[in-house]
Image (cartoon, grey):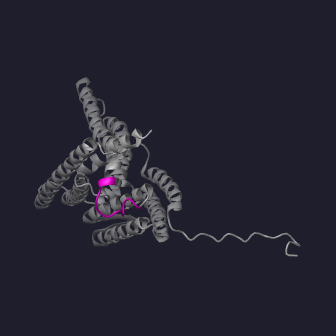
């Protein structure tokens, strides 16, 4: 009986495997973040090149879209670099952040894999008409390769990282030896996932402000008004992320209002306009516009239907999260006393 308590701490402290795993993951994430920053720089150079060559055959939207992609890749890579450093150094906030980020990565990867596997064959059919047997074989190989790459990057890789960050020895290692602030530990994981989603909204809006196109309640805003609106939206998403991290009721109400307003805006806008109108406002024309239209039309379901599905899922998730926020509790009514009990 007395030997058992002595063995348990020893087993707990057998930490080289989880520590080595954290070092390997941290190095891998920092390497991925560094490569992403290099890619963002290359994309930014490409955007300037496309802008300079805009009058020689490329569409006017090329440089803006490449610059937006550069910003998105750069900010995401910076996040991966910082969290990878936190994992390498065993900072307490790194494990909860990456634990929820990998689940969001996995969910988005599942949707992306399903869309690619369904949309790509339809896009081939719509663009080529009746292909020869050799062309059909090439299309099938391309579809298989792209679906496999999407599944690897969107399913297998985040699944492995999710397992690693949720593995009990890794959790114990961060709990016992982790350093730094506990702000991520103190936030429930479902709420932290909402904070990360709002952070992704900031990245998306900042990148979109470079393109300068915003469908807004039936109007397609372009240029400076669209960019200003998206920057304000990015600031709003950042403020909501901070309030939700602190689990304040105004953060929850703001997230719900943003979700419902975005859904209503998309539904009204794409009732009066087609995706082609938005792409044209973004500067695409000619063959590029036709190719993008083919890809959009090949995606199962339409933008309004996707919007309603995602809004329903998001609203249900927010209703579930309400229990974690510091809403004032209603006072319980005083128990009623039977007549004559006072006497």
Residue at 39%, 55% in the rendered image: 274
Whether residue 156 can be seen here: yes
Determine whether, in the image, residue 106 is placed left or right of residue 57: right
Whether residue 298 can be seen here: no
Residue 248 position, x and y percent, is: 46, 69
Question: Quick check: 256 above or below 43?
Answer: below
Give the quarter of the figure containing the C terminus.
bottom right
| Residue 182 lies in the magenta-colored region | yes
Residue at 29%, 62% in the rendered image: 180
Residue 288 position, x and y percent, is: 24, 50
Residue 318 position, x and y percent, is: 50, 59
Determine whether, in the image, residue 308 is placed left or right of residue 167: right
Residue 24 position, x and y percent, is: 21, 45
| Towards the viewer: 309 or 194 | 194
Question: Quick check: 299 above or below 81?
Answer: above
Give the quarter of the figure containing the N terminus.
top left
The magenta stretch is: 176-186
């Amino acid at each position: 009986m007395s030997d058992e308590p002595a063995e348990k701490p020893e087993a707990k402290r057998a930490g080289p495997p989880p520590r080595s795993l954290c070092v390997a993951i941290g190095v891998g994430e920092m390497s991925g973040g560094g490569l992403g920053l290099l890619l963002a720089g290359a994309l930014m150079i490409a955007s300037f090149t496309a802008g300079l060559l805009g009058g020689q055959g490329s569409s006017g939207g090329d440089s803006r879209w490449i610059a937006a992609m550069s910003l998105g890749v750069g900010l995401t890579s910076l996040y991966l670099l910082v969290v990878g450093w936190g994992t390498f150094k065993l900072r307490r906030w790194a494990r909860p952040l990456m634990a929820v980020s990998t689940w969001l990565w996995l969910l988005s990867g599942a949707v992306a894999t399903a869309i690619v596997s369904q949309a790509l064959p339809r896009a081939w059919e719509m663009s080529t008409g009746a292909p020869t047997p050799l062309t059909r074989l090439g299309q099938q190989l391309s579809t298989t390769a792209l679906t496999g790459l999407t599944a690897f990057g969107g399913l297998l890789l985040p699944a492995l990282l999710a397992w690693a960050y949720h593995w009990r020895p890794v959790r114990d290692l961060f709990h016992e030896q982790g350093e730094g602030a506990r702000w991520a530990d103190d936030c429930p994981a479902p709420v932290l996932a909402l904070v990360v989603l709002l952070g992704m909204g900031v990245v998306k809006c900042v990148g979109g402000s470079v393109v300068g196109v915003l469908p807004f309640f039936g109007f397609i805003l372009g240029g400076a008004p669209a960019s200003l609106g998206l920057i304000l939206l990015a600031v709003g998403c950042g403020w909501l992320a901070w309030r939700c991290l602190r689990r304040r009721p105004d953060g929850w109400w703001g997230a719900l209002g943003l979700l419902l307003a975005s859904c209503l805006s998309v539904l009204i806008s794409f009732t009066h306009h087609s995706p082609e109108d938005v792409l044209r406002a973004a500067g695409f024309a000619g063959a590029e516009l036709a190719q993008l239209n083919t890809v959009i039309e090949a995606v199962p379901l339409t933008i309004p239907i996707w919007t309603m599905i995602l809004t329903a899922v998001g609203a249900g998730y927010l209703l579930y999260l309400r229990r974690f926020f510091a809403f004032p509790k209603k006072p319980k009514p005083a128990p009623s006393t039977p007549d004559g009990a006072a006497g």
